[in-house]
């Protein structure tokens, strides 16, 4: 075992890991952060997408030891106060972009990585950003709408905060 330091949603934690453990395993099974879903564990479905150093990545494709010292964001960190939904989560609900919901945490995190770069993404940019996230339920139309709405909500939020 190796003791590593992970920075997750702004907080540092020390965790003992085996060299071959992936970050998804550590999040779900060691740290009990089950908001990040496991659909395949083989880097095929996108359900486990998180953000590392500003980029959306699948947690099952990253060795935990290689994530040490990096800035990791998971779905648990989205709510700013622990009570209210993040505007991206709200937009997914507003647009009916959630059906079974299993793919949703990964979709939301991929959406956040995109919206952190631009609040007015084109449909093409949205589809490109979400192309590694498989959803068997929605047909993606409502998901694309949700990402556009999330950008609008974030712009309004910025205006209301005088930014
Ligand atoms: S669980 Fe990681 S891509 Fe499917
Ligand atoms: S909402 Fe069911 S897989 Fe996406």
Image: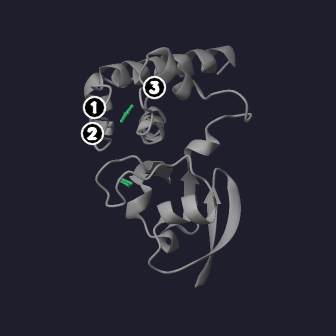
- Number of on-image labels: 3
**Residue drawn at 55 percent across, 65 percent down:** 26
Q: Which residue appears at 43% of the width and 30% of the height?
A: 118
Position of 122 relative to 59 (above/below): above
Which residue lies under the disc numbered 2?
A: 131
| Percent x, y of residue 65 | 51, 74
Where residue 150 appears, as percent x and y from the top left, is: 49, 22
Farthest residue, direction front: 100
Q: Horizontal and vertical percent for residue 31? A: 64, 61
Q: Residues within 10 Å of mark 1 (few under 14, many from 20)?
A: some
Using the numbered discs, state the Cα–Cα distance from disc 1 to disc 2 in whole angstroms: 6 Å
Look at the image and tell me whether residue 36 can be seen.
Answer: yes
Q: Circle 1 sits on which residue?
A: 127
Answer with mark 3 or mark 2, whichever residue precedes in sequence: 3
What residue occupies the far bottom of the structure in this picture? 1
At mark 2, the secondary structure is loop
Q: Residue at x 57, y 51 (%)?
A: 34
Kindly identify which numbered label has been placed on residue 32: none
Mark 2 surroundings: few (<14), some (14-19) or many (≥20) residues within 10 A: some
Would residue 70 be seen by someone viewing this image from the given angle? no
**Do the numbered discs 1 and 2 sit on residues whose CB atoms are within 8 Å?**
yes
Image mark for residue 119: 3
Q: Please name whichever residue, 8 or 39, is drawn nearer the observer in this view of the structure.
A: 39
Mark pair 1, 3: CA separation: 15 Å
At horizontal 41% and vertical 23% (from top left) the residue drawn is 97
Disc 3: residue Cβ within 8 A of ligand 2's nearest atom: no
The crowd level at tag 3 (other Cα within 10 Å; few <14, some 14-19, many 20+) is: some
């Amino acid at each position: 075992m190796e003791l590593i330091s992970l920075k997750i949603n702004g907080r540092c934690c020390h965790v003992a890991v085996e060299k071959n453990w992936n970050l998804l395993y550590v999040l779900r099974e060691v740290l009990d952060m089950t908001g990040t879903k496991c659909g395949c564990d083989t880097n095929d479905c996108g359900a486990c997408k998180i953000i590392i150093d500003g980029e959306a990545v699948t947690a099952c494709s990253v060795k935990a030891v290689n994530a040490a010292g990096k800035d990791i964001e998971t779905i648990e960190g989205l709510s700013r106060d622990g009570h209210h939904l993040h505007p991206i989560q709200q937009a997914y609900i507003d647009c009916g972009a959630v059906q079974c919901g299993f793919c949703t945490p990964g979709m939301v995190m991929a959406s956040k990585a995109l919206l952190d770069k631009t609040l007015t993404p084109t449909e093409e940019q949205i589809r490109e950003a979400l192309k590694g996230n498989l959803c068997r339920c929605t047909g993606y139309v409502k998901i694309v709408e949700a990402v556009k709405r999330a950008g609008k909500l974030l712009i309004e939020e910025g205006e209301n905060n005088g930014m």
